[in-house]
Image (cartoon, grey):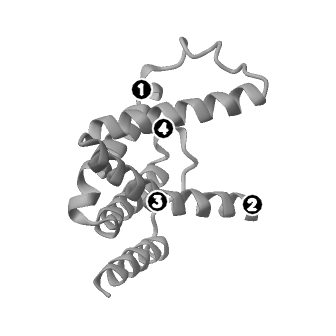
Amino acid sequence: MTQYALVMLLAGMGIPILAALNGTLGQRLGSPVGAAMVLFCVAFTATLVVWLARGGGGMTGVTQVPRHLLTGGFFVAFYVLSVTFIAPKFGVGNAVFFVLIGQLISAAAIDHFGLFGARISPLDMKRALGIAVMALGVWITQRA
């Protein structure tokens, strides 16, 4: 479990870096959408390399899965486009602050109801307090 937490910590650390880099790239290119396209090309290439290194495969059933399971890419595109447009104007910290608050709310709802096949983890008072403390911590950090 520790290695999972470490990987997710690193992934979380990458979100503001992505926001800062892509926001600046969008400004330099004069096109936030162009910057998003570059990001997705690089991401696709990196994913393709990892997929090939792991032997490929695992794609034969993609045409049989429920269509809603394929919509995750829209959320990634929405995030990347939003942060690329907004972070340079609003600040990386402010943009990521609201992303984090949104993640806390969404994650709590997904876990509570077991949405999208997630393991059910009811939102009790102890968990709600923990989420509130996390949100407060993020808010205090942005106010400092």
Q: Which mark is residue 94?
A: none
* Precedes in sequence: disc 2 or disc 1: 2
Q: Which mark is residue 17?
A: 3
- Viewport quadrant of the N terminus: bottom right
Q: CA distance from mark 1 to mark 4?
A: 9 Å
Q: Which mark is residue 116?
A: 4
> Which type of secondary structure does the marked residue at label 2 adopt?
helix
Q: CA distance from mark 3 to mark 2?
A: 21 Å
Q: Nearer the viewer, residue 103 or 40?
A: 40
Q: Nearer the viewer's eye, disc 1 or disc 3? A: 3
Inspect the image, locate mark 4, and give the three-letter code of the amino acid beneath it. Phe
- Viewport quadrant of the C terminus: bottom left
Mark 3 surroundings: few (<14), some (14-19) or many (≥20) residues within 10 A: few
Q: CA distance from mark 2 to mark 4?
A: 24 Å
Inspect the image, locate mark 3, and give the three-letter code of the amino acid beneath it. Ile
According to the image, label 2 marks what residue? 3
